[in-house]
């Protein structure tokens, strides 16, 4: 077998293994309200491009204008490849887990993870900060992977309550521990840009599990790490 064929086979095997692991993890995370995908990414881009062009026409926008003519394509690519990329399980991040050989048994906390999602009610941004904590059992996760998991679940139409739960479900499963806590403080542009048009209010959600829920001292220790950044 040639080296190029051998490398291709190895890469294909690694890709399939990564996808299998992603499906296993996501099976243990509460789902978003989605349908089984019928289209490739390229097909989705073409269909969204067409339909968004129709929306713009109904708004009496001139698609022959050089500032607007590429907008449907830009929107379609942004939806599929960027802000809604978390709808595709193949984009679930590679997770690095190591044995807790150091026998660390205190809280690991990552604060102020910037998060940007899209409200599924009005398709306007949710902009905020996430704090994630866990108490290791036998496994420890690479710190940057915590940020990547948060980003993955944020990259889809969301409500903040579900986003909070999905992040907690994921870490509880992959770390094999009930001692997981997630806190989100965010601004919702469906509140800022329309309706009440309140530019100051923020929304806080949290999911406390295991010791974070049952032991008052652990709960307080975690919540002290959960600062609200917007009003600082």
Image (spheres, rainbow, N blue to C red):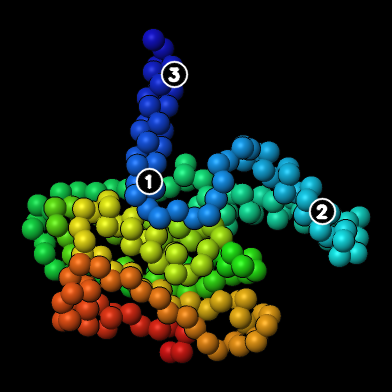
Q: Find residue 223 and report its horizontal and vertical position in percent.
A: 28, 81
Residue at the spot x=27%, y=83% of the render? 224
Instruction: Tell how many labels.
Output: 3
Q: CA distance from mark 1 to mark 2?
A: 36 Å
Q: Earlier in the sequence, mark 1 or mark 2?
A: 1
In the visual, does 167 lie left or right of 173?
A: right
Instruction: Report the Cα–Cα distance between label 3 and label 1.
Output: 34 Å
The residue drawn where x is 61% and y is 76% is 189
Q: Which residue is mark 3?
A: 4
Q: Earlier in the sequence, mark 2 or mark 3?
A: 3
Q: Does the rendering let one see residue 207?
A: yes
User: Mark 1 and mark 3 in contact (Cβ < 8 Å)?
Assistant: no
Residue underneath mark 2: 53
Residue at position x 43%, y 47% in the image: 92
Q: Nearer the viewer, mark 1 or mark 2?
A: 1
Which mark identifies residue 27? 1
Labels 3 and 1: the sequence-earlier one: 3
Name the residue: 37% across, 61% down: 167
């Amino acid at each position: 077998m040639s080296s190029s064929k051998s490398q291709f086979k190895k890469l294909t095997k690694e890709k399939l293994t990564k996808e299998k692991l992603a499906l296993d993890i996501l099976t243990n995370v509460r789902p978003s309200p989605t349908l089984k995908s019928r289209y490739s990414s390229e097909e989705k881009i073409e269909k969204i491009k067409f339909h968004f062009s129709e929306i713009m026409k109904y708004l009496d926008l001139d698609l022959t204008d050089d500032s607007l003519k590429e907008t449907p394509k830009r929107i379609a690519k942004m939806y599929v490849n960027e802000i809604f990329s978390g709808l595709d399980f193949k984009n679930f991040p590679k997770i690095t887990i190591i044995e807790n050989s150091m026998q660390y048994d205190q809280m690991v906390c990552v604060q102020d993870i910037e998060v940007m999602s899209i409200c599924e009610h009005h398709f306007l941004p949710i902009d905020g900060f996430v704090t994630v904590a866990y108490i290791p059992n036998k496994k420890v996760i690479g710190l940057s992977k915590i940020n990547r998991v948060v980003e993955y679940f944020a990259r889809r139409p969301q409500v903040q309550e579900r986003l909070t739960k999905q992040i907690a479900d994921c870490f509880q499963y992959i770390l094999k521990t009930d001692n997981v806590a997630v806190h989100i403080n965010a601004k919702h542009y469906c509140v800022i840009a329309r309706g009440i048009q309140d530019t100051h209010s923020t929304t806080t959600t949290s999911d406390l599990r295991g010791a974070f829920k049952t032991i008052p001292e652990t709960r307080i220790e975690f919540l002290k790490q959960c600062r609200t950044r917007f009003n600082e």
